[in-house]
Amino acid sequence: MQHYKIAAIPADGIGPEVIAAGLQALEALERREGTFKLDVTMFDWGSDHYKKHGVMMPADGPDRLKGFDAIFFGAVGAPDVPDHITLWGLRLPICQGFDQYANVRPTKVLPGIASPLAGVGPGDLDWVIVRENSEGEYSGIGGRAHRGHPEEVGTEVAIFTRTGVTRIMRYAFKLAQSRPRKLLTVVTKSNAQRHGMVMWDEIAAEVAQEFPDVTWDKMLVDAMTARMTLKPRSLDTIVATNLHADILSDLAGALAGSLGVAPTANIDPERRYPSMFEPIHGSAFDITGKGIANPVATFWTAAQMLAHLGEAAAAARLMQAVEAVTGAGILTPDVGGKATTQEVTDVVCEAIRRSNI
Ligand code: NAD
Ligand code: MN
């Protein structure tokens, strides 16, 4: 029996609701497969912890996570705590401290969930966006001079290193190679941004040599938004910078029907540290406590976590159960249904128990 140590950090808002749902599905899978066991440790870090102790997590928080095989994360954000505290106090230190440089965001139109694009159904939109997660436009480097004066200047420095770009490019090519269509689109803005972005293009061409069976092309990020909307079938795997992929993946989530179904994985491909799995959405305090949070994004990221741990069969079974349930129209209100979080979770668990793939 394989044992995996999972750190669960439900955190804020609907985070605890969707993580509870995800853990129920994982337990159902454990019983169904009978080949692995998840040893889950819960951490009460987040905005309530901040209000009690003045910090989102204890100073030795990252050290306490080091020995785990994966981190299962809910969401951060509270109405009465500034966003820069919740984000920089918990999520970002984990991503950066564990060098989770590949942010992997699968998007597809699930059965039973309508895309806002006319005529686009399951199979027509099936992408994975790879977001560079460690440098680029979110380096935090910059400053303000002559603050408040008419001549004030603010700078926001984007850092691209050969090491950083090469490793994300190699990750993206490898991922594209593992998918049936073996298709990669490299996104930049190298017509207007002439340094780091031109380096992206050059490194893409170099790394492409290592993957002769992958078909790849280049897109400028502005034209990419049009292509995603007008020709979704022409895309498969996509790699982009921290900022560009941040924007493109929100568009992707919307085109697939809802933020409530979009998952993400923050991966350390070298497996030096635990990787972190979370829904893309935030703490959604407008619906917190109502029992109607869509758990699908969290189920999907649980499947990403199982695949990362090496439990591909369990990951496939979970996604098959989720698609059977959305396809049967058992949906939360954000995607046009009437079901509660618990009702969706119960039928997904039942589908896992009954499945025989
Ligand atoms: P949000 O994702 O929390 O919510 C946006 C809208 O989508 C809301 O109307 C919400 O009800 C809906 N929604 C989101 N997830 C849903 C789900 N699972 N089921 C049904 N509906 C869902 O974004 P926001 O409102 O901009 O931010 C709220 C807080 O979350 C802020 O403090 C923000 O900083 C934080 N945030 C955190 C993360 C994260 O933890 N990774 C991501 C985004 C936002
Ligand atoms: Mn974003």
Image: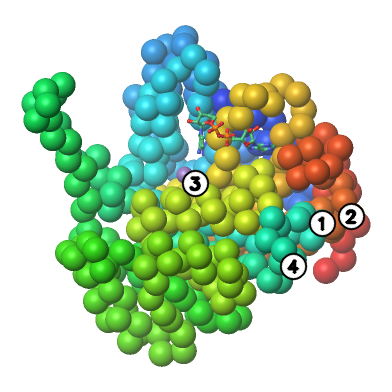
Residue 163 locus on image (x, y percent): 23, 64
Q: Is the CB of the residue bearing disc 3 within 8 angstroms of ligand 1? A: no
Q: CA distance from mark 3 to mark 1?
A: 28 Å
Q: Nearer the viewer, residue 349 or 37?
A: 349
Kindly identify the residue that appears in the image at 33 percent across and 42 percent down: 97
The residue most toward the top is 52
- The secondary structure type at the circle numbered 2 is loop
Disc number placed over residue 112 in the picture, else none: 1
The residue most toward the front is 150
> Residue tagged by mark 2?
328
Kindly identify the residue that appears in the image at 51 percent across and 79 percent down: 183
Q: CA distance from mark 4 to mark 1?
A: 13 Å
- The secondary structure type at the circle numbered 1 is loop
> Residue tagged by mark 4?
119
Q: CA distance from mark 1 to mark 2?
A: 7 Å
In the figure, residue 201 lies in which quadrant?
A: bottom left
